[in-house]
């Protein structure tokens, strides 16, 4: 990893960064047609970082036209899969060569700890592009079992123009999760990053072009959700939108699709993930370690955040004490300092939203075990303490709504049935984890929990080989990662031939 590990060196690298601030359309950086820009800021200081092109419907239209033109020309969509693979592998190499810069961009703009960006987000971003690149020339179409007088080919074809609308919590990684399979399958892409985090996406587009992704195949239109995001959702020439973000906005995309051209919609939305710890959990120190990561990694700004710790009464006090002790070692502070495990909340309104949930927890009678306050205010940044509530009931607001902050709720249970009911008593179903030594119980409960990913004796989202996405209101239409993601960026075609 080519980033300096020592805080002074990391800080010294910041002024040397060059920000790409214009839209990237048809292979070139370009201003928004209106000439408008918006400010992106550093949530760790509250200070502006850059002015970004504020794209709106006309810019989206221009990008979609460029994407369509490139798609129809066949320059990418009909390229030999092995050749597309070569270009995407080169793209991954360029991402790797610039990994330190990409990590810094995400740290500066999203307030994420540099250690996470440099050792998790960006390496995963690179692996994701590589994984889907490698899959490009290893997927076969099918011949259906007809009678001898016919030949029926069942083919997968690229869809055309894919719109991607992504959030701010894993800026580069979410771009890769969408464009990796979409580009590998031969589509052309128009991507709108979150308005709070445009920098790494714009740099990735430049690197993709440098690797040989043809002009018009990967376009980035920074801007606001209500304007640029909606314009993608409603565009009559976009064939599919892949979205990650809140369930509320996810619903809009279904509406946009219904009111426009019935474009395919893939939604990866919020979560309220349970971590169920049975009394026979193998090792409470190990459980505490996973529980702390699940709840506080990325400041809890994570859709699979294990925000509900559902613990058997018998071990609850012991586990709460262990989690609290460990959580205290997860330092909150300057995200450029690799010793800090938590950085800043993404923006002031979001900090206030998180503090509002903490106030609601107290008001509803939950017991505050640790944290609960805004800290480091003098920095100008939006930092909040690692926070844990005990004696939470599943009816409380903090147990029902996605907080998207470092706030863990402990909910006790007595029987396996009760634990499963609590785990499933949510509108969401993205992820879950469970801890037990009993193999039968592990299988039983893993199957009973209604969630897209259930991890056993650990907290995990799986890896690139496993699909990621949610049941219930956590998702719609498909999955990120794995060959299943690859498939969903294609359309199924039957070619039926009469042979005799
Ligand atoms: P949003 O769902 O609002 O944003 C996700 C993306 O959708 C962004 O690119 C956003 O643009 C865009 N968008 C917003 N409104 C519209 C719209 N009307 N039409 C089309 N696109 C739109 O998430 P937020 O960033 O506002 O976060 C709000 C909450 O959502 C969080 O507190 C958290 O609970 C949840 N969330 C869940 C995520 C997940 O991974 N599942 C990720 C991020 C948030 P813009 O940035 O301009 O608003």
Image: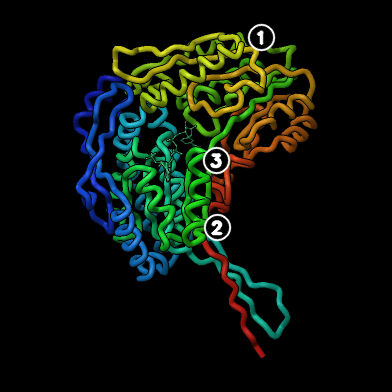
Q: Residues within 10 Å of mark 3 (few under 14, many from 20)?
A: few
Mark 3 residue element: loop
Find the distance from the CA under tag 2 to the CA under tag 3: 17 Å
Task: Quadrant for the C terminus, please.
Answer: bottom right
Residue projecting furthest to the front: 259
Question: Taking the image as drawn, is residue 20 in sight?
Answer: no
Pair 3/1: label in front: 1
Earlier-in-chain disc, 3 versus 1: 1
Q: Which residue is mark 2?
A: 487
- In the image, 274: left or right of 263? right
Up/down of 327 relative to 84, above or below = above
The percent position of residue 34, horizontal first and vertical second, equals 22, 50
Q: Are marks 2 and 1 in contact (CB under 8 Å)?
A: no
Tell me what residue is drawn at x 34 percent, y 65 percent: 70
Q: Is residue 347 visible?
A: yes
* Residue drawn at 54 percent across, 23 percent down: 295
Question: Disc number at residue 318?
Answer: 1
Tell me: is circle 2 under 8 Å from ligand 1.
no
Describe the element under mark 2 as helix, strand or loop.
helix
**Residue to which mark 3 is pinned:** 463
């Amino acid at each position: 990893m080519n980033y300096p590990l020592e805080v002074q060196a990391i800080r010294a690298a910041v002024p040397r960064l060059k920000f790409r601030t214009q839209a990237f359309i048809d292979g070139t950086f370009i201003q928004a047609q209106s000439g408008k820009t918006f400010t992106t800021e550093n949530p760790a200081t509250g200070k502006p970082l850059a002015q970004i092109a504020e794209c709106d419907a006309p810019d989206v239209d221009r990008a979609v036209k460029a994407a369509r033109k490139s798609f129809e020309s066949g320059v990418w969509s009909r390229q030999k899969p092995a050749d597309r693979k070569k270009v995407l592998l080169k793209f991954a190499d360029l991402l790797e060569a610039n990994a330190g810069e990409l990590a810094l961009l995400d740290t500066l703009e999203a307030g994420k700890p540099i250690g996470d960006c440099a050792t998790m987000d960006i390496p995963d971003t690179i692996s994701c592009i590589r994984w889907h690149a490698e899959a490009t020339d290893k997927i076969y179409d099918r011949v259906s079992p007809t009678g001898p007088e016919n030949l029926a080919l069942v083919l997968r074809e690229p869809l055309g123009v894919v719109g991607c609308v992504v959030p701010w919590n894993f800026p580069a990684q979410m771009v890769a999760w969408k464009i990796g399979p979409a580009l590998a399958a031969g589509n052309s892409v128009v991507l709108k990053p979150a308005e709070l985090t445009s920098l790494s996406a714009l740099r990735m587009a430049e690197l993709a072009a440098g690797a040989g992704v043809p002009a018009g195949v990967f376009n980035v239109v920074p801007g606001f959700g209500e304007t640029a995001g909606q314009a993608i959702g409603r565009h009559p020439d976009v064939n599919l939108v892949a979205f990650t973000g809140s369930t509320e906005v996810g619903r809009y995309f279904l509406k946009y699709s219904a009111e426009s051209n019935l474009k395919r919609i893939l939604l990866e939305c919020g979560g309220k993930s349970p971590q169920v710890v049975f009394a026979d959990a193998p090792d409470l120190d190990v459980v505490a370690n996973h529980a702390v990561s699940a709840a506080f990694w990325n400041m809890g700004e994570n859709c699979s955040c294990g925000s509900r710790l559902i613990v058997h009464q018998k071990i609850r006090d012991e586990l709460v004490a262990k989690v609290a002790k460990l959580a205290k070692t997860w330092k909150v502070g300057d995200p450029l300092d690799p010793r800090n495990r938590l950085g800043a909340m993404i923006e002031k309104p979001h900090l206030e939203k998180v503090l509002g949930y903490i106030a609601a927890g107290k008001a509803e009678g939950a017991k505050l075990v640790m944290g609960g306050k805004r800290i480091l205010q003098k920095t100008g940044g939006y930092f909040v303490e690692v926070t844990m509530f005990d004696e939470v009931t599943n009816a409380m607001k903090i147990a029902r709504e996605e907080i998207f902050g470092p706030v863990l709720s402990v909910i006790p249970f007595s029987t396996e049935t009760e634990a499963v009911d609590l785990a499933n008593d949510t509108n969401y179903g993205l992820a879950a984890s469970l801890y037990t030594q009993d193999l039968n119980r592990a299988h039983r409960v893993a199957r009973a929990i209604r969630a897209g990913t259930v991890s056993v004796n650990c907290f995990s989202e799986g890896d690139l080989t496993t699909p990621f996405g949610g049941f219930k209101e956590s998702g719609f239409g498909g999955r990120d990662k794995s060959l299943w993601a690859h498939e969903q960026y294609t359309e199924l075609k039957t070619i039926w031939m009469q042979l005799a």
